Structure formats: C-alpha cells, structure tokens
Image (spheres, rainbow, N blue to C red):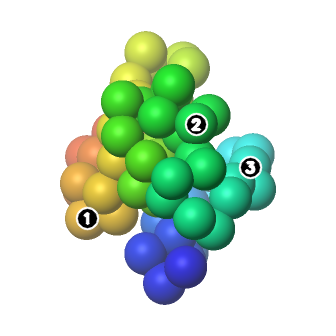
C-alpha cells in the first residue's frame, strides 16, 4: 500500500532494521492487526524497544523522525 511504502522508505532512510509482516488485503480479515493495534488499518508500527504501537503513516513517520533521526 502507498501508506506502508512511506513508512518503509523512512525506516530505510533512517537505517532502522525492521520486520515487515504481511496481512490480509481485506480490512474485515485483519484480525491480527486489530489484536495488536485496536484497529484494522495499515501500516502499524510496533516498537518493542520503547513500548509503542501506533497506526497511520503520518504519525509513524513523525514518531520515527522524533525518536530516531540523528
């Protein structure tokens, strides 16, 4: 999805290692996404190191810039 690509591009630019997890295309079948984030939209970022889980590409990119940009 284009929103996922924005996040992946920023992760790459910041040289952050990450695991990308495939999910169902249909919102109604994204049970794992809902379990993790409370909603079914993607992308979702889970930062185990900082105990953060969030959705929405703009918020994720802002978080990455604030938390990881040198």
Camera-side residue of 45 and 14: 45
Depicted 55 relative to depicted 26: above or below = above
Depicted 33 relative to depicted 38: above or below = below
Left or right of residue 10, residue 21 in this image? right
Binning the other alpha carbons within 10 Å of mark 3 as few (below 14), some (14 to 19) or many (20 upward) gives few
The residue at which mark 1 appears reads as: 58
Binning the other alpha carbons within 10 Å of mark 2 as few (below 14), some (14 to 19) or many (20 upward) gives some
Left or right of residue 17, residue 56 in this image? left
The residue at which mark 3 appears reads as: 21
What residue is shown at x 43% (from left), y 18% (from top)?
A: 50
**Is label 2 or label 3 in front?**
2
- The CA distance from mark 2 to mark 1 is 23 Å
Which of marks 1 and 2 precedes in the sequence?
2
The residue at which mark 2 appears reads as: 31
Q: Are the residues flagged by discs 2 and 1 in contact, CB closer than 8 Å?
A: no
Instruction: Give the SS element for disc 2.
Output: helix
Question: Looking at the picture, how far across and down is residue 3, in whole percent?
Answer: 43, 75
């Amino acid at each position: 999805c284009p929103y996922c690509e924005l996040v992946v591009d920023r992760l790459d630019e910041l040289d952050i290692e990450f695991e990308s997890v495939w999910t169902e295309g249909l919102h109604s079948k994204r049970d794992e996404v809902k379990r993790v984030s409370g909603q079914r939209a993607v992308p979702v970022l889970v930062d185990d190191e900082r105990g953060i889980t969030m959705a929405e590409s703009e918020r994720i990119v802002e978080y990455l810039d604030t938390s990881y940009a040198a």
